[in-house]
Amino acid sequence: MTTNATLLSDEVIRFLNENRIRVTISLDGDRDTHDRMRVFRNGKGTYDYILPKIKKFLASRKGRVPVRATITRYNLDVVGIAEHLFEVGFDNVMMSPVTALPCEGHALTEDDVEVLKGKYTELAYYFLDMIRSKDKRSIMAFTSLLPKVHRASRRVYGCGGGRNYMMVDPVGDLYVCHRCGGEEKLKLGDIYEGIDPERQRKILENHVDLREDCSKCWARYLCGGGCIANNVVYYGTISKSNQMMCDLYKHLIELTVWLYSEVYEEEREFIERICERDERLFMKEGEENKQK
C-alpha cells in the first residue's frame, strides 16, 4: 500500500508490522519541495507533520521502506531529491513523473522533460558512484530496469494490472489497478458477478506487439508499453502512449544500459543482488515467507 503518512500513528504502524504489509511512503523531497504540492485543507504544508511519523516507521523496519517522490515541473532536481530521501533514512528511492494534463500548472512540459533528461543523466552518475562505493541503497529508476537488461527480458505489458492483480473498491467493483478507481473504461467487473471476459480481453490484447505506436519501438520489450492508466488520462484509451513520457523512459533505458556496461564486470555482486531482489518481488507471499 502507498500512504502520505498523515495517518501513520503508533497503532497503524503496529498493525502494518504485525501483518507484514508492504508500504510505500509518498514524500516529494525536502520541506519546500514537498509542501509545494502536499498541503492540508487549510493550506499548511504536511512535511513537518509527517516527518516524525515517517522516522518512527523507518526505525521499526530498520530503514527498509521504499519512498516515492512525484516529479512535477516544480521539482526536477532528482539528484537533490534522492540525496534528501536517503538522508531521511530510506533505503529505496522511487521517482515517478506526475500524471497531469497540460492545463494543470504542475504538469511537465516538453521543455521540462528535456531538463529532466539531463537531471536523470546526473542521477545515473550519482548512482554509479554509490554502486562503486558498495552502497546498498537503491534508486528504482535504474534498479527496476537493470535486471531486465541483464536477462534480456521480453516484457510485453507495462504491468500486471488486470492480469495478475486488480483493485477492489469499497462497493465491490473491480478495476485494473489502484490508479483506476471510478474510471469506467478500466472497470473489469465486480465481486458479485465476477470479471467481464470481454473487458479483460481488451487488457490482454493491449500488448506492445499489437499496439501501433509500440510495435516498432526499439525499447518496447524493456518498457512493456507504459502505464495504461496514464494513457486513459491523456487520451481516453489504453492503447495510445504519451510520446513525451516515452522519450523520457527511453532515455532512462539508455542510461540503464550504460550503467550496466559500467558495472557488469567489476560489480557482479551488485548485479546478482538486484536480480535476486527483483525475483523476490514477484514471488507469492507464502513462498517468500518460506525462504525467510
Image (tube, grey):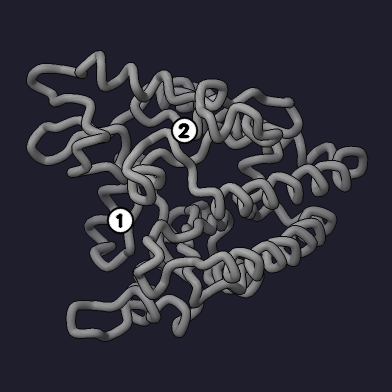
Q: Residue furthest front?
A: 212
User: Where residue 62 appears, x then y in whole percent?
Assistant: 51, 56
Q: Residue at x 41, y 27 (%)?
A: 285
Q: Quadrant of residue 171?
A: top left
**Of the two numbered discs 2 and 1 in the rendering, the one whose residue sits closer to the viewer:** 2
User: Where residue 9 appears, x then y in whole percent?
Assistant: 25, 64
Q: Residue at x 31, y 45 (%)?
A: 179
Residue type, mark 2 in image:
Cys
Name the disc covering residue 159, or none: 2
Are circles 2 and 1 on residues that touch, CB within 8 Å?
no
Label 2 CA crowd tier, 10 Å (few <14, some 14–19, many 20+): some
Q: Is residue 210 above or below residue 259?
A: above
Alpha-carbon span between mark 2 and mark 1: 28 Å
25 or 214, nearer to the observer: 214
User: Where residue 228 appears, x then y in whole percent?
Assistant: 40, 38
Going by the image, does 108 lie left or right of 237? right
Residue 86 in view of the camera: no
Q: Secondary structure at mark 2?
A: loop
259 or 21, nearer to the observer: 259
Going by the image, does 275 lie left or right of 94? right
Going by the image, does 259 lie left or right of 167? right
Specify which label sits upstream in the sequence, 2 or 1: 1
Q: Is residue 103 above or below residue 256?
A: below
Q: Label 1: which residue?
A: 13
